Amino acid sequence: MNILILGSGGREHSLAWAVMQNPKCDKLIVAPGNAGIAQIADCASLDIENGGEVVSFAEENAIDFVIIGPEAPLAAGVADRLREAGILVFGPSGDAAKLEASKSFTKEVCDAANAPTAGYGHFTDAEAAKAHIRKNGAPIVVKADGLAAGKGVIVAMDEQTALDAIDDMFGGAFGGAGAEVVIEEFMEGEEASLFVLCDGEDILSIGTAQDHKRVGEGDTGPNTGGMGAYSPAPVLSAEIEAKAMEEIIKPTMKVMADRGMPYQGVLYAGLMIKDGQPRLVEYNVRFGDPECQVLMMRLGGQVLDLMQAAAEGRLAEAQVNWADDHAITVVMAAHGYPGSYEKGTEITGLDALPEDSANMVFHAGTKAEDGKVLATGGRVLNVTARGESLQEARDRAYAMVNGVDWPGGFFRRDIGWRALD
């Protein structure tokens, strides 16, 4: 098969790495890719949010299967354009992608599905939103309704922080994503992620993970796109996962199908777990980043077969073959992230690090220039390792982190602390 992956981050690097391990893959192109991806696949310059351009590129390059990595092209309907052109694609329709692109839409679907989630209010007016906050007090959660690259969520532990968040969102801090806001009750518990594949009818669980969203050690400081992750998530036991499937995932998929927008692709459910009961925090319509990196490390080449089965409506005959192992990824980010940060700093030491089925550095925000690897984003590298235990995987990952020479970056030293403590 000739395969095209859309995206340029650590998620897409790990997807490319896994897909390349499957003998079914004859040729792999990633658009636009990054410096790490360029070492294992061809990279192409392409506007991945332009469905017509993606279709033309796929036809010109005899692409058999397109895998869409980020949420933005999904929300833009790129999967729809590919399906209309008869090209096999992994990713939901633009309508179905509203499960991530609009938090108020997700809340409406949850209401219809009777899926357990936080109580909420949806606002298009700043003063009405502030009145709701003053009435309900803190802690409270303020979310930009639209896509905000994982940063449009403010967990406000005091009322003033929540009110400031309203000013920021309606003031344009998150662009168009903050033109509407959803304000939710604060849910206590431990958060974890469940990943399932859907083909419009059948559903297959493909793993659990736990992310560290806060920038600081001990899960402190502002939210980020994710500073590290590990899989599996011990808090998501088989019993709790089964509850989440029956009470949240399956009812959601039925509502989507009943509304004429059957869901096909990967669905990532962020869950809050307390006293053995899962409640939905949010849905994402693509693999998490950096959760994808640990899932791909554990799944390997079989993920191509699973994604193809989902795209072709054959999930009923698919199964996941899990190794009894663990994986962890440590994000190395540019100093200043998630605020302003410097671009173009040089990273060295990567060539000396191992690259095999148990040790990989996935590039998230890099470019190659004049023989050097330069940082181009906030989250730049995902140092990822497998082990028979989480501790073994963690030790391997941090040994690799210590081999990276990048004065312009930083990382958390406590990824996995909840599970290991």
Image (spheres, rainbow, N blue to C red):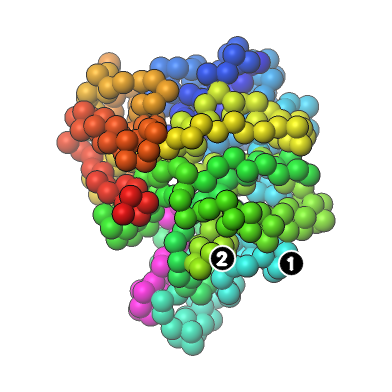
88 or 56: which is nearer to us? 88
Q: Report the span colored magenta.
A: 148-166
Instruction: Give the number of the mark in front: 2 or 1.
Output: 2
Q: Is residue 324 above or below residue 129?
A: above
Q: What residue type is labelled 1?
A: Ala
Q: Distance between the residues labelled 2 and 1?
A: 20 Å
One can see residue 408 in this view: yes
| Helix, strand or loop at mark 2 | strand
155 part of magenta stretch? yes
Labels in figure, total:
2
204 or 88: which is nearer to us? 204
Q: In this view, does 226 lie to the left or right of 407?
A: right
- Which residue is rendered at x = 39% and y = 20% of the image? 356
What percent of the width, then of the height, locates residue 162? 40, 74
Q: Is residue 389 left or right of residue 305?
A: left
Q: Is residue 5 left or right of residue 62?
A: left
Q: Which amino acid does label 2 sit on?
A: Gln
| Helix, strand or loop at mark 1 | helix
Residue 399 lies in quadrant = top left
Q: Which dot marks residue 112? A: 1
What percent of the width, then of the height, locates residue 336? 25, 49
345 part of magenta stretch? no
Q: Is residue 360 above or below residue 204?
A: above
Q: Which dot marks residue 69? A: none
Q: Is residue 158 above or below residue 320?
A: below
Which residue has dot 2 on it? Answer: 277
242 or 103: which is nearer to us? 242
- Which residue is rendered at x = 45% and y = 42% of the image? 231
Q: Quadrant of the N terminus?
A: top right
